[in-house]
Image: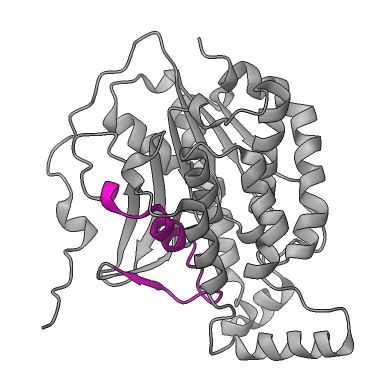
Amino acid sequence: MITPLPAPRSSGALKQRRVQQPWPRDREFRILSIDGGGIKGIFPASVLAELEERYLGGGSIGSHFDLITGTSTGGIVALGLAIGMPAREIADLYIDRGCGIFPPYPKTLLGRLRGRWDRLRNVVLSRYDRAALTALVDETFGERLLGVAKCRLCIPSTDGRHGNVYIFKTPHHPDYTKDQHERMATVACATSAAPTFFKPLESGGYRFVDGGVWANNPIMVGLVDTLACFDVDRHKVRILSLGCGDEPYTVSERMLRWGGLWSWRTVIDGAMAFQSENALGQAKLLVGAERVLRLTPTAVSPPILLDDWARARELLPGEAVRVVLDQGEAVREAFLARA
C-alpha cells in the first residue's frame, strides 16, 4: 500500500489576515533570533551561557524572550532553550561532542591525504553521515514533541518535496495546530540538513533541507510571525540577534574575469550573507535600529568553516566572553529586566 504524500505547506496558507491575539499594551515583545552556522553555533550558545552566568545566576535565559527563532545550528540552540536547558550545557555539547559530527583530520600526512580525498568525494556525495547528529539530538530531546516547548518557537526549514519554505511553529496561535506533534529531534535534524554536508531528511512524506538556504538569519521570520500573531505595536518589539560570523562576500578578480560555475562555486555563501544583511536591515526599518541588538564574532582570516570544529572550539568561546564584556549590560537592560 502506497502512503499518500502530505499536502504542501503552502496549501494551508490563509486567504485573509490572521486574527491577532491580544498583547498587553504596556509590555514589550522580546525576540531572540539565532543564525545558522554549523559548528560555529558555539558562539551564540556561549554568548547565552555567559549572559546566564553573569546576570541570571546560571538559570536558563529562554524564559526572558517572548519568541525564539533559530535556523540550522541556531534552531538546535533554540530547541535546547525551549526545554529549559542552560545555555552552558548547550555550548558544552558543541564543544565536547561537535567533533563527532564534524570529525577533524589528524595533523599528519595521512590526515591531509584523507582530507583531500574527502573533498574530492564531496563533489558527488554528502560529506558527513547524519548518524552522529541524530544520536546527539535524540539523546538531548528524547521523545519530546514541539508542543511541550516552554517558549514560542519558529524554526525554519525547507521542503524539497513540494518546493516550499517550511517553518516549524509551536502552537502559540490557534491557527498553529500541526507542528506541535512533531518530535523536537526531527525538527532539529530538519532545520540543519545542510546541502553537501548531509543528505536531505525524509520525514512524514516531506524532504527537508537546511533552513539556511533561505533564512540563515531568521530575524524577519520571528518578527513577521510576531506581528501577524499578536496585537503588538511594532515599536514595542525588541530583538536580540545572534550571528555566527558576518564575513562580507565580495566578487573576486577570478569571478569578474572568468565567470562560470567554478569561479562562482561559493555563491551560496554570498546568498546567505546578503540574505542576513537584508533581513537585518528590514527588521531595523520596521522596529527601529535602536531596538535591534546584533552580536556576532569578529571576522578572522581565514574564516572559520561551518565544519571546522577545532578552530571554532579554540576561538569562539573567547569571542563570546569579549562580546558579553562589551555588550552584556546593554543586553541585560533591554532583555533581561522584565518591565
**Vertical order, 55 against 177 (above or below):** above
Q: Residue at x 39, y 44 (%)?
A: 154
- Decide which of 205, 133 is in the foreground and name it: 133
Residue 209 location (% of width, % of height): 42, 67
Q: Is residue 250 visible?
A: no
Q: Is residue 240 visible?
A: yes
Magenta segment includes 199: yes
Q: Residue at x 41, y 49 (%)?
A: 155
Residue 293 location (% of width, % of height): 61, 30
**Vertical order, 311 against 76 (above or below):** below
**Vertical order, 71 against 100 (above or below):** above
Residue 14: quarter of image: top left
Residue 60 location (% of width, % of height): 57, 31
Indicate the colouring scheme.
one colour
User: In screen coordinates, is 145 left or right of 56?
Assistant: left
Residue 98: quarter of image: bottom right
* Numbered range of the magenta stretch: 179-203
Q: Residue at x 39, y 60 (%)?
A: 186
Q: Residue at x 16, y 64 (%)?
A: 7
Magenta segment includes 259: no
User: In screen coordinates, is 245 left or right of 163?
Assistant: right
